[in-house]
Amino acid sequence: KNEVEQSPQNLTAQEGEFITINCSYSVGISALHWLQQHPGGGIVSLFMLSSGKKKHGRLIATINIQEKHSSLHITASHPRDSAVYICAGPPYNTDKLIFGTGTRLQVFP
Amino acid sequence: EPEVTQTPSHQVTQMGQEVILRCVPISNHLYFYWYRQILGQKVEFLVSFYNNEISEKSEIFDDQFSVERPDGSNFTLKIRSTKLEDSAMYFCASSAGDRVFSSYEQYFGPGTRLTVT
């Protein structure tokens, strides 16, 4: 069983739709990262959060530490949001990130 | 905005050859990491490095792998004798702090795609 699970694995949407990607983890982690991986392979950090909610532009990330669950929301999705979204976290007493398998998002015009 | 850089972007090598992947972390960061991603798979942790020594390594990081910070700016990953299964995208990351501090967001480089033939 993966320590960090994401759903769905693949997601297609029409431009303008509200997107939700979910992440559940079985290990105790001190904070959760949401990352974006572009088709060329580069990884960009979107959020790091350990409680509550964070918002950046059209992106919103929430986390429930007790339930070991986090969500990434994209409002008013756009084709340029097409990418793989990955959640990752460092288990307690370590700095290494354990990664989910990623959610491949395609937004069509 | 400061960023992590990696060179080369793509390296092709023959099985058994040594390769060195180079990274320049963000200048005031103190913690450095290597991750890899085999095509179609999830990103995996290889090694973390702080204060000129390895702080943690994974099972993947065997005797064929080594890391070094030869000067104040570069952070390198060496694979001594490459195998076919070493073909992957290798990402370097750096952070200003560790779990003890509030800001330990890791910043990733663009990756080096290693192809072993």
Image (cartoon, coloured by chain):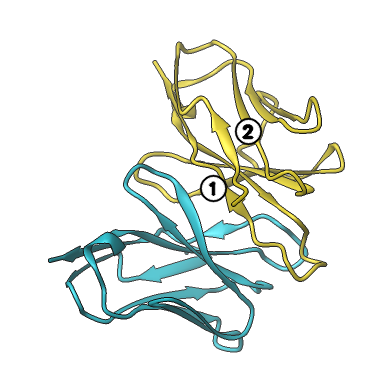
The x and y percentages for residue B16 are: 53, 11
The picture quadrant where one finds residue A64 is: bottom right
Residue drawn at x 75%, y 56% as measured from the top left:
B96
Q: Residues within 10 Å of mark 2 (few under 14, many from 20)?
A: many
Amino acid found under the numbered disc labelled 1: Glu
Q: Chain of mark 2?
A: B
- Report how far apart the C-alphas of labels 2 and 1 lie in the structure: 17 Å
Residue drawn at x 87%, y 42% as measured from the top left:
B51
Q: Are marks 2 and 1 on the same chain?
A: yes
The x and y percentages for residue B52 are: 85, 37
**Residue B44, numbered label:** 1
Q: Chain of mark 1?
A: B
Is label 1 in a helix, a strand or a loop?
strand
Residue drawn at x 78%, y 59% as measured from the top left:
B97
Q: Is residue A19 left or right of residue A102?
A: left
The x and y percentages for residue B54 are: 80, 40
**Residue B23, numbered label:** 2
Residue drawn at x 65%, y 74% as measured from the top left:
A28
Shown in cyan, the chain is A
The x and y percentages for residue A77 are: 26, 73
Query: Which residue is the extreme one toward the front?
Result: B1
- Asked if disc 2 and disc 1 are in contact, CB closer than 8 Å, the reply is no
Q: Residues within 10 Å of mark 1 (few under 14, many from 20)?
A: many
Is label 2 in a helix, a strand or a loop?
strand
In the displayed structure, B58 sits above or below A12; it is above
In the displayed structure, B11 sits above or below B61; it is above
Shown in yellow, the chain is B
Q: Which one is closest to the eye, mark 2 or mark 1? A: 2
**Residue B6, numbered label:** none
Q: Nearer the viewer, residue B23 or B48?
A: B23
Q: Nearer the viewer, residue B8 or B98?
A: B8
